[in-house]
């Protein structure tokens, strides 16, 4: 389902659209919980509550093309709130500071850095959804599929000449680079 | 002897975007026009840094999926919330009012109906309720003109829910005497009376959308309680 019909479906409380939305954005929501070092029931709780909060807040979605960033921010705010409920006297900045100074965390990127990365990922997904169908499919297949398929596999799957995959992906990534700049306000 | 290929390479000024992507993705350690050129050209080095950042971001966007059963559980909860929303916005037909509307009418004739609005919910944390909801419970605060109503839903030992609440007058010190209430969940109706301090308890509440009607003097305060308990 494309972005615009998906958002229309979400706004109309269409069950199919909501099923699709939760499936498509589950990785991003789950990643926020992981970056906040939530585990087990806490992580599951954040995931479910973020989906529930999305249902309640869908009318606040101002720009349908920023759906990833919107759901990312809902998940992030709920994660921050979950941490504060657990340790109400500690601010997020302090939590991050504590994380930076702890020996266990020194080997890992800080929460804040990781969240910035996730916010960039959310922007990338929004940019990806603004690409034309062909580019969107190609970028998804080449860069978001694990393991990455060979050009021969892509040529077969997409019915494209193998020689045109490289130049097409370069054009698509160039378009995405422009879109990312515009989404970042750059 | 100069080959044709070499002549072409020598004439070129900058590396293009596609070549830079190919260079970054090839992972080949051999010296190429691009690798040599990047060492001397700031413009192409900047473009290369941008391309590298974008490829890194694409790799980061390959996020692991949560377990399928968690997605299913979250979806079911979200869909349940949607059906509750739909039920709450349904039109009330005067010719065949729903069961809860009939039940509320039975509370008394000529009551002035006040639709309470939710102002805080521990599932949507705010300063008003932060820290106020015990684990596994859900606390909501409603505004109903000159009254505030606080309710807390908790699981009981049998898996049903317990609803504890209090009506508080905003302006006067006392509540009108004889306050009573009725809770409708599906086709079930549960009744209780308010204590002197406006407190009430309802037990053994089944799952589903709840509508609570509270009679205070000549007013009927109506609360729509939208959601199931937070899962423990």
Image: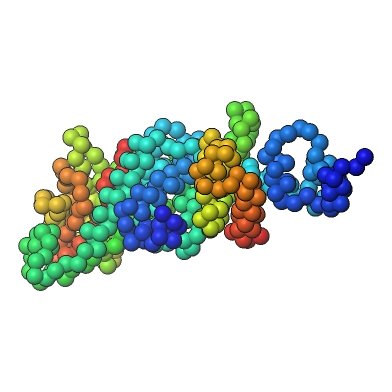
Quarter of the view holding residue A105:
top right
Q: Quadrant of the C terminus of chain A?
A: bottom right
A40, above or below B153, in the image: above
Question: Can you give x and y, in whole percent of width and height, for residue B130 in the image?
Answer: 40, 48
Question: Can you give x and y, in whole percent of width and height, for residue B61 in the image?
Answer: 55, 43
B29, above or below B23, in the image: above
Q: Is residue B124 left or right of residue B154?
A: right
Point 62% across, 28% down: residue = A103
Judging depth in this view, the residue of B219 and A54 nearest the camera is A54
Give the tally of numbered discs: 0
Q: Is residue A83 visible?
A: no
Judging depth in this view, the residue of B117 and B132 nearest the camera is B117
Judging depth in this view, the residue of A121 and A147 nearest the camera is A147
Residue at far top of view: A104
Question: Can you give x and y, in whole percent of width and height, for residue B98 in the image?
Answer: 12, 61
What color scheme is it? rainbow
Q: Quadrant of the N terminus of chain A?
A: bottom left
Point 50% across, 60% down: residue = A65
Q: Is residue A25 left or right of residue B70?
A: right
Q: Is residue B211 visible?
A: yes
A11, above or below A86, in the image: below
Point 32% across, 49% down: residue = B78
Point 87% across, 42% down: residue = B3
A149, above or below B144, in the image: above
Judging depth in this view, the residue of B173 and B125 nearest the camera is B125
Question: Can you give x and y, in whole percent of width and height, for residue A171 in the image?
Answer: 64, 54
């Amino acid at each position: 389902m494309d972005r615009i019909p998906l958002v229309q479906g979400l706004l109309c409380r269409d069950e199919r659209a909501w099923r699709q939305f939760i499936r498509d954005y589950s990785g991003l929501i789950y990643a926020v919980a992981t970056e906040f070092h939530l585990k087990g029931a806490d992580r599951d709780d954040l995931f479910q509550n973020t989906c529930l909060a999305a249902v309640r807040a869908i009318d606040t979605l101002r720009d349908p093309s920023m759906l990833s960033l919107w759901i990312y921010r809902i998940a992030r705010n709920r994660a921050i709130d979950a941490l504060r409920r657990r340790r109400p006297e500690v601010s997020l900045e302090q939590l991050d500071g504590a994380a930076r100074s702890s020996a266990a965390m020194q080997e890992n990127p800080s929460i804040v850095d990781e969240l910035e990365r996730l916010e960039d990922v959310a922007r990338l997904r929004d940019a990806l959804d603004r690409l034309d169908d062909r580019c969107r499919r190609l970028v998804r297949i080449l860069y978001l599929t694990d393991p990455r398929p060979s050009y021969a596999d892509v040529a077969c799957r997409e019915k494209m000449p193998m020689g045109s995959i490289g130049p097409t992906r370069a054009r698509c990534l160039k378009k995405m680079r422009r879109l990312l700049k515009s989404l970042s306000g750059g | 002897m100069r080959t044709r290929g070499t002549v072409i390479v020598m004439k070129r000024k900058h590396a293009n975007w596609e070549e830079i992507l190919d260079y970054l993705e090839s992972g080949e350690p051999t010296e190429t026009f691009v690798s040599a050129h990047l060492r001397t050209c700031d413009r192409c080095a900047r473009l290369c840094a941008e391309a590298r950042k974008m490829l890194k971001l694409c790799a980061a966007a390959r996020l692991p999926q949560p377990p399928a059963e968690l997605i299913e559980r979250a979806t079911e909860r979200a869909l349940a919330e949607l059906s509750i929303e739909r039920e709450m916005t349904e039109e009330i037909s005067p010719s065949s009012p729903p069961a809860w509307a009939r039940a509320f009418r039975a509370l008394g004739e000529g009551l002035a109906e006040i639709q309470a609005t939710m102002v805080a919910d521990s599932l949507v944390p705010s300063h008003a309720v932060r820290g106020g909801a015990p684990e596994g419970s859900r606390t909501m605060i409603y505004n109903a003109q000159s009254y505030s109503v606080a309710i807390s839903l908790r699981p009981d030992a049998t898996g049903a829910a317990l609803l504890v609440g209090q009506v508080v007058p905003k302006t006067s010190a006392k509540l009108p005497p004889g306050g009573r209430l009725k809770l409708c969940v599906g086709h079930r109706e549960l009744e209780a009376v308010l204590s002197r301090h406006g407190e009430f308890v309802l037990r053994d509440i089944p799952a589903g959308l709840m509508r609570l009607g509270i009679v205070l003097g000549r007013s009927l305060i109506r609360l729509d309680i939208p959601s199931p308990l937070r899962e423990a």
